[in-house]
């Protein structure tokens, strides 16, 4: 299976009381598929997965499997602290469903480049689905080197990379190193430079903002694939303006809660999910912030 296109990282909807809201998750899946996405990535950073219990993760995954019903590939995050914990998480979740897994480097553990290579090799050997490396140093506190990723790609250990490093130089170099690999897929996790990533040779994008406007990102992707870079830029410029919803919060809201909270608030205002509730202890956006987001959504033509 070769992956490409727009694969948004699914948000995890909660009820106003804080429970997993399966009805809202199902509606969000429909919103994404109706927008033309190529796949869905569940249980990643945008899912607030570090805040979820194992039972909640399993409930979300079962809900996704049922709602997707085989219409698009389902990629699942299996991010844990160390190799053994990732393998355990992957095997437990894949028993429910999923077409590929996403794996970060180890975190909390003190390791080196050799251990990271053994980490990915052991995980790939333990599962029978494709493995994506997830380069997200803001969470793992270490950047996955281009040389390591290219080596793992060439040897078939990983089938792709989700790059959320915000390192455009490394992204470009990895694209060059893997350009001849037909079965390898490099994705950007950046919301506002997807046109540049596509020009660099990306297979697609995994934008959190894609939960709000999946059709916009699909238009951007299709324009880029067609070589219509003026149209791709115009769509990216519109989406960059929409992305300013993450800047409406007060200092009492953390950076992570501001971004994901803005996406949830937008979806609540659009009638896709029932509540903007964040996972404890993150702060949910207030009504004043929601009204600011309403204005930006209106300007983007989403209300």
Image (tube, grey):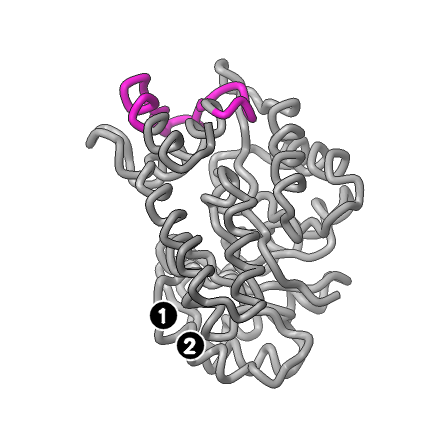
Is residue 86 covered in magenta? no
**Residue 292 sits above or below residue 110 on the image:** above
**Mark 2 and mark 1 residues within 8 Å of each other at the beta carbon:** yes
Q: Residue at x 77, y 34 (%)?
A: 66
The spot of residue 98 in percent (x, y) is 73, 49
**Residue 202 sits above or below residue 12 on the image:** below
Q: Which mark is residue 172?
A: 2
The spot of residue 84 in percent (x, y) is 61, 57
In the image, 12 versus 227, the foreground residue is 227
The spot of residue 53 in percent (x, y) is 56, 33
Q: Residue at x 69, y 57 (%)?
A: 100
Would you say residue 70 is visible in this rendering?
Answer: yes
Q: Residue at x 43, y 29 (%)?
A: 266
Q: Which mark is residue 295?
A: none
Picture quarter containing residue 297? top left
Residue interval drawn in magenta: 270-292
Give the main secondary structure of the magenta stretch.
loop
In the image, 194 versus 153, the foreground residue is 194
Q: Residue furthest top?
A: 17
Is residue 284 covered in magenta? yes
The spot of residue 85 in percent (x, y) is 59, 52
- Mark 1 is surrounded, within 10 Å at the Cα level, by few (under 14), some (14 to 19) or many (20 or more) other residues, namely some
State the SS at label 1: helix
State the SS at label 2: helix
- Mark 2 is surrounded, within 10 Å at the Cα level, by few (under 14), some (14 to 19) or many (20 or more) other residues, namely some
How far is the residue under mark 2 from the one under mark 1? Answer: 6 Å
Check disc 1 and report the residue beneath it: 168
């Amino acid at each position: 299976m070769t992956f490409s296109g727009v694969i948004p990282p699914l948000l995890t909807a909660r009820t106003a009381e804080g429970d997993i809201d399966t009805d809202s998750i199902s509606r969000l899946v429909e919103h994404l598929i109706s927008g033309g996405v190529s796949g869905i990535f569940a249980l990643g950073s945008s899912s607030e997965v570090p805040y979820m219990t194992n039972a909640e993760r399993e409930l979300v995954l079962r809900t996704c499997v049922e709602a997707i019903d085989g219409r698009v590939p389902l990629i699942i995050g299996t991010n844990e602290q160390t190799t053994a914990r990732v393998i355990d998480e992957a095997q437990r979740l894949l028993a429910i469903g999923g077409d590929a897994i996403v794996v970060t480097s180890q975190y909390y553990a003190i390791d080196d480049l050799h251990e990271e290579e053994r980490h990915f090799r052991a995980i790939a050997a333990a599962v029978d689905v494709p493995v994506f490396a997830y380069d997200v140093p803001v969470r793992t506190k270490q950047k996955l080197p281009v040389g390591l990723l290219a080596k793992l790609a060439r040897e078939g250990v990983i089938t792709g990379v989700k790059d959320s490093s915000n390192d455009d130089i490394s992204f470009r170099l990895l694209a060059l190193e893997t350009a001849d690999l037909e079965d390898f897929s490099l994705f950007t996790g950046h919301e506002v430079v997807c046109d540049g990533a596509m020009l660099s040779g990306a297979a697609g994008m995994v934008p959190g903002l894609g939960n709000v406007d999946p059709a916009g990102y699909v238009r951007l992707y299709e324009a880029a694939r067609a070589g219509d870079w003026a149209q791709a830029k115009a769509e990216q410029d519109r989406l960059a303006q929409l992305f300013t919803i993450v800047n409406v919060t007060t200092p009492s809201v953390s950076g992570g809660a501001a971004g994901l909270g803005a996406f949830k608030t937008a979806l609540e205002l659009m009638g896709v999910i029932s509540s903007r509730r964040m996972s404890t202890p993150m702060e949910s956006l207030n009504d004043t912030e929601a009204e600011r987001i309403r204005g930006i959504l209106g300007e983007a033509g989403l209300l």
